[in-house]
Image (spheres, coloured by chain):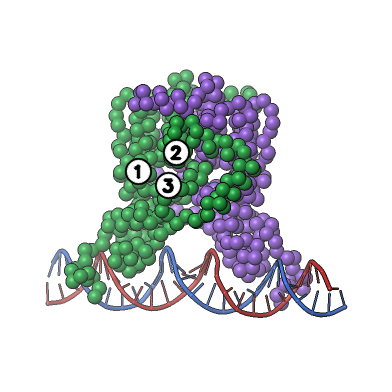
Chain colours: A green, B purple, C blue, D red
Amino acid sequence: MTQQIDGQRRVRLNRNRVLQAAVSLADEAGLDELSMRRLGQELGVVPMALYKHVANKEELLDGMVEAIISEIDPAVGGADWKNAVRLRVLSARAVLQRHRWARQVLESRTNQTPAVLGYMDSFIAMFLAAGFSVDLTHHVMHAMGSRIWGFTQELFDDSAGRGGGDAVEVAPEVQAAMFEQIAARYPNILQVATAARHDEGSVVGRGCDDQFEFEFALDLLLDGFERLHRQGWTSRQAKKQQRNEG
Amino acid sequence: MTQQIDGQRRVRLNRNRVLQAAVSLADEAGLDELSMRRLGQELGVVPMALYKHVANKEELLDGMVEAIISEIDPAVGGADWKNAVRLRVLSARAVLQRHRWARQVLESRTNQTPAVLGYMDSFIAMFLAAGFSVDLTHHVMHAMGSRIWGFTQELFDDSAGRGGGDAVEVAPEVQAAMFEQIAARYPNILQVATAARHDEGSVVGRGCDDQFEFEFALDLLLDGFERLHRQGWTSRQAKKQQRNEG
DNA sequence: CCATAAAGGTGTACGTCGTACACCAACGGG
DNA sequence: CCCGTTGGTGTACGACGTACACCTTTATGG
């Protein structure tokens, strides 16, 4: 009975099929449904079989990240570094949006795999090619942080009203009561959280356009980088100035 | 034998002692050493005893976060919003530095506890008090992201050479070989990563001052906010402009 | 002061997880 | 055809969170 499916011989596993299946599973079921056991089941194979193709779960996750990084558009050449960076980041963002688990994986571990390093290297290259000093580029990369992957820590919970999923169901009247509580205790949050709703014409929707928020912060940073670059900013001089003020 | 230690009656547990112990344990041993079993052991109590004080592990983590938020300095009043925000963030940063696990906890979950909401509310208040529009404040908060907690996603692995811990030990010659590999394959990373080392006089040290990096990005954003505020930025107008360009 | 209910602590047990290890099946090159 | 290498199986172990039934301590109010 082993190795048979419907009387047909089963295709042999390989690292790529494992990674591919893991990505699909995580895409569809979420990261915490991704266990070695479940993945094995998905591939019609006993859990331990996977260990012939990946050393352990950590390596599986690394492999998955490597796999999706290849989906990010390569850097575009050309004179306009700002636009190049912008496009690259937004491409990464689109990818990470397709694979929502990836963010958590990138956040939770220090990923030193070749694809990650390669991506970072080519990212740095965009600034250096634009004439940024190595010094400034260093700090710029730090300032970009996880934004090079197209995501930022989300502070507000925008999962309310997200379809499907296994969110806890709450009765409408309870929801209303919670709203009242928040309104009373956290008036500023209330104001700011609902701000996006009424200044957007009659669009009901989510009330907050994540993509816009992301680009807002991204452009703010890019503009800042540009200014510093133009005025020949160096960290040495910034630190000296800091000492004199402090 | 139960309830006895050295013939002395044991102090009763309560939610606060549990939370306190959990924070200490996480501080000292790291987040993945924090299990209900280990925590019970630390308190000289059977694991299930903890469930009389916290509903489950999730709630324990929430409680821990609440506990450390109280360590953040309250907002300072006064005319200079920029400095107020700056101080607040740097205070939060100092706290999160003391409790390194907190970052992971804040990252991995949507924390809607009163202390978190209270902190965010008072954070928003700083901008509103400075005359920022609700609209701009909304976007500003998004742009701040996890920076309101004083941390950013770290991209470079700066754990190399960190004392203690359970890092994998690597022979020096292997390390050198790895370095060669990286140097060859990722020349830009090499340049940028080592940049901080030689422009800092003769300081050997870590080669990269995290605090400086954090403040660099923070100030870049704050300056950006200030500029937008001064020129009366609104999201409606920004979106219109975006449409005309795009 | 004692009965009694509430609150705090225990012990056992279940289902999950990652994965070590010994084993067997299939394949491919001599 | 044989046999070593590679891929897949089965069993088992030690974590984990936590449900549930039970006992012990404490506080309370008649």
Label disc, if present, on residue A95 of the rendered structure: 1
Residue A236 seen from this side: no
Label disc, if present, on residue A103 of the rendered structure: 3
Mark toward the start of the polypeptide (2 vs 1): 1
Closer to the observer: label 3 or label 2?
Answer: 2
Mark toward the start of the polypeptide (1 vs 3): 1
Residue identified by numbered label 2: A204
The answer for which chain carries disc 3 is A
Would residue B206 be found to the left or right of residue A23 on screen? Answer: right
**Please, what is the three-letter code of the amino acid marked with disc 1?**
Val
Q: Residue furthest front?
A: A173
Does dot 2 land on a helix, a strand or a loop? loop
Residue A83 seen from this side: yes
Q: Nearer the viewer, residue B126 or A182?
A: A182
Would residue A50 be found to the left or right of residue B128 on screen? Answer: left
- Quadrant placement of the N terminus of chain B: bottom right
The answer for which chain carries disc 2 is A
Q: Residue at (53%, 29%) from the top-left corner?
A: B136
